[in-house]
Amino acid sequence: MIFIAFFGIQDKEKLLGTTSNIICPQCSEVTSGEVYKTYRYFHLFLIPIIKWNKKYYVKTDCCNRVFELNPEVGKQYEHDPDVVINKGDLEPIALYANMKYCEHCKANVPYEYQYCPYCGKELQD
């Protein structure tokens, strides 16, 4: 956060809600997830004036992966939480691209591991 006198620039993350019946692009399970909106804004006397760099994300409950949501679908979800989010609306984020998912303890583990370092169970490819 940059704060000079009575104005500044700040980042914000806002939980828009939860949604169900999403097909996870990573593990192909039907799951639910949390929908988030992130943005940067300029404020004057702590009142937001201008917002930019708006992005929408979905964090799935099945494997705790975060996917970037299509901005058009994100805007629709913001106004109507009953909007259907399809598998094609979700883009993997590079941070999670080389990770495996432990089905036993729900941890994200580096791809080269054969066993989960948290619970010791063998990882599936």
Image: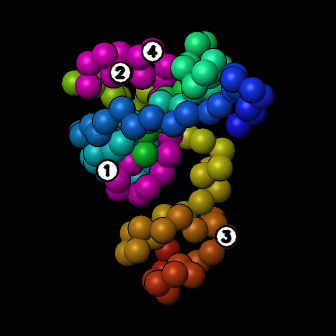
Q: Amino acid at mark 1?
A: Glu
Q: Which residue is mark 1?
A: 29
* Image quarter (top left, top right, bottom left or bottom right) of the N terminus: top right
Task: Identify the secondary structure beneath mark 4.
Answer: helix
The percent position of residue 119, horizontal first and vertical second, equals 46, 84
Q: Which mark is residue 72?
A: 4
Which contiguous range is marked in magenta? Answer: 60-81
Q: Earlier in the sequence, mark 4 or mark 1?
A: 1
User: What is the crowding at mark 1: few (fewer than 14 residues within 10 Å), some, or many (at least 20)?
Assistant: some
State if disc 3 and disc 2 touch (CB < 8 Å): no
Q: Is residue 41 visible?
A: yes
Relative side of 113 to 73, left or right: right
Q: Earlier in the sequence, mark 1 or mark 3?
A: 1
Q: Amino acid at mark 2?
A: Glu
| Tag nearer the camera, 3 or 4 | 4
User: What is the crowding at mark 3: few (fewer than 14 residues within 10 Å), some, or many (at least 20)?
Assistant: few
Q: Earlier in the sequence, mark 4 or mark 2?
A: 4
Q: Which mark is residue 78?
A: 2
| Tag nearer the camera, 4 or 1 | 4
Between marks 3 and 4, how big is the CA–CA gap?
Answer: 36 Å
Above or below: residue 91 compared with residue 113: above
Relative side of 115 to 53, left or right: left
Whether the magenta-drawn stretch holds residue 10 is answered as: no
Task: Identify the secondary structure beneath mark 1.
Answer: loop
State if disc 3 and disc 1 touch (CB < 8 Å): no
Q: Which residue is mark 3?
A: 112
Q: Earlier in the sequence, mark 2 or mark 3?
A: 2
Task: Identify the secondary structure beneath mark 3.
Answer: loop
95 vs 78, nearest the viewer: 78
